[in-house]
Amino acid sequence: MQESDEPISGNHGSPRFRAFPGPGKGALLGRLFDRCLEGVCLGLLVATVAIALTQVFFRYGLNASLSWPEEMARWAFVWLVFVGMAVNTQRRSHISIDFLSTHLPALARPYQGLLVRTAMATISIALLVHGTDLVSRSTYVSPALEWPFKTLYLAIPVGAALTLLALARQREPGDPVPAGGVLACALGAGLYFLVRYWGADLLPGWATSTTLVATAVVLIVLGVPVAFALAFGAFAAFSPQGELLLLTVPQYMTAALDSFILLAIPFFILAAGLMNVSGITGRLVDLATRLVGHLRGGLGQVNVLTNTMMAGLSGSSMADAAAIAKVMVPGMEARGYPRPFSCALTSAAAVLANLIPPSLGLIIYGALASASVGALFVAAIMPGLLVAVTLAVVVHVMSIRRGFGRDTERASGSERLRALWRALPALILPVLIVGGVRFGVFTATEAGAVAVLYALVCGTAFYRQMSWAGTFRALRESLFDTVAVMIIIAAASPFAWILVTEQLPQRIAQELGVLATSPFLLLAMLNVFLLVVGLIMEMIAAMVILVPIFIPIVTAAGIDPIHFGVVLVVNLVIGALTPPLGMLVFTTARVGEARVVDVFKAIGPFLVGLLCVLALITYFPAISLTLTRIIGP
């Protein structure tokens, strides 16, 4: 990820625009303010890691468990995400779908951008107003630290106010007026009052869930970031029902983040970032080249094997896709592989990061479904390896059809052993994480903190390539990625709560009741549904909304929740390869400098292979559950 003072491409492939620069001291003060805000968030990120490691040290080093670290880490994390919401707004790095903007005429795009910022300003004002109300009404104190909950809830209005400031300072090329950001905030204030006080008249007779879903879907299609669209939907749904229900929007957003298990997400993202700047990726590529570079389609096989090994380190498909595309795509093109093919292969192989543990998707599923993260980690090992083998077979077949040859000479045994020795410190980490979580040595969150510490040790003591600049760059990239993911989880919480209170899961379960006696048909139907959802929704948001709905249904049908978790994650990572969202494709196309359309065309054979694996995993539960049963609880 590049520095924020240049126009770069965001998570969704659309440009990020610089803040309103202004002349002289104003611009300098603005940049200083941005850096200070980033510094606060980076300090909170480092603090959460340090607190989690403190808990591990006292428990196992001094045999004295502390009561306060977990609570302090959770509260710091809540502040990190809400303040980070403003940082990501400033950088235009929230996750959104830019399908509409890419198909609009050039003259219409500034107006679409103004509409997007107006919607973001509207929900920021709603969070500011009702978050402040929540703070004033809060009377409880926390059990461990005995801090007032006002301190926790204050993160919402503070983050919303900072987000409004970031929006006001933004400008977009071709804005209808010079101060486009200020206009968006003014229009947002008007839209807030319109929805708040006349919402019942605007949407007569609509059910709450209908308002919720319709509003969110329309805004997502228009290009509003997913998190803001979900929160706007909840705000619009509750507005006609009074002040007290509106308090549930900021309250449930905070409650969603006040979870120790979810701290594993920023920890593993940070660990992946540190590994990418510590020389680990290069060692893994070298090892993969020594092992399989001499096969037909050698660099393609190296790509798959490198992604497989990286998956056991990072847990983040986006991080792996960007890192490996940067390393592999230029080299593959130099050997005669078309650039779209190389990017498509990298995208497809990057899904392994959400299958082979530590998988962020599995961690989130475990938190939502109250399932054992350790069991999920073990259950995903065989499906992940099956995906890797399938992709290797696809590469081999396509290499024969397209005439790709062998790219390197067969390495000798001693060369392979030397490459393995250099990569061994990195390869120990997956065993440490899976074994530690599965056998209860530490929680998934503490494993993430241990992974961060281990990555620092590898980069400094073993590979000696870690620098202050690289560490700082990894911290910044991890901060932006963490906020982009976690703000969606926060916004999806009131969204999901409304669906549950409207008894939508129960109604779906009733409709599917006829299939409950046939797990085969039920799984087939859920697979089709999840594949469609993957076309239009990012994995994290889809999981937060759908897992609470589906768990009672699959449990009633006698389907093991651990098995279903693996099936669900495979479905949704396939969605990261399909248009119009296809975030892994956008990532590798951007890093690999290929046309997105060409990459989507080239990914077809890999999708066929992944769909075959999905069918096998779905209808042969033993692939997922055998290792879990062997290793035990």
Image: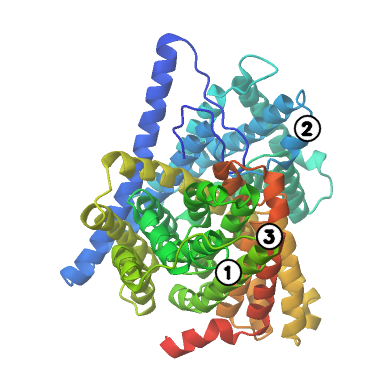
Can residue 253 be seen here? The reply is no
| Residue where numbered disc 1 is placed | 392
Looking at the image, the residue that sits furthest to the top is 24
In front: 488, or 568? 568
| Residue where numbered disc 2 is placed | 104
The kind of residue on which mark 3 rests is Arg
| Residue where numbered disc 3 is placed | 402
Q: Earlier in the sequence, mark 2 or mark 3?
A: 2
Crowd tier of the residue under label 3, counting other residues whose Cα lies within 10 Å: few below 14, some 14–19, many 20 or above? few
- Looking at the image, which residue is at 64% across and 28% down? 189
x and y percent of residue 425 in the render? 29, 65
Q: Secondary structure at mark 1?
A: helix
- Looking at the image, which residue is at 55% across and 60% down? 300
Instruction: Say whether residue 518 is left or right of residue 74.
Output: right
Compute the Cα span from label 2 to label 1.
Answer: 39 Å
Compute the Cα span from label 2 to label 3.
Answer: 37 Å
Q: Earlier in the sequence, mark 1 or mark 3?
A: 1
Where residue 266 sits, quadrant-wise, is bottom left
Q: Could you tell me how many numbered marks the image carries?
A: 3
Q: Secondary structure at mark 2?
A: loop
Compute the Cα span from label 1 to label 3.
Answer: 15 Å
Can residue 18 be seen here? The reply is yes
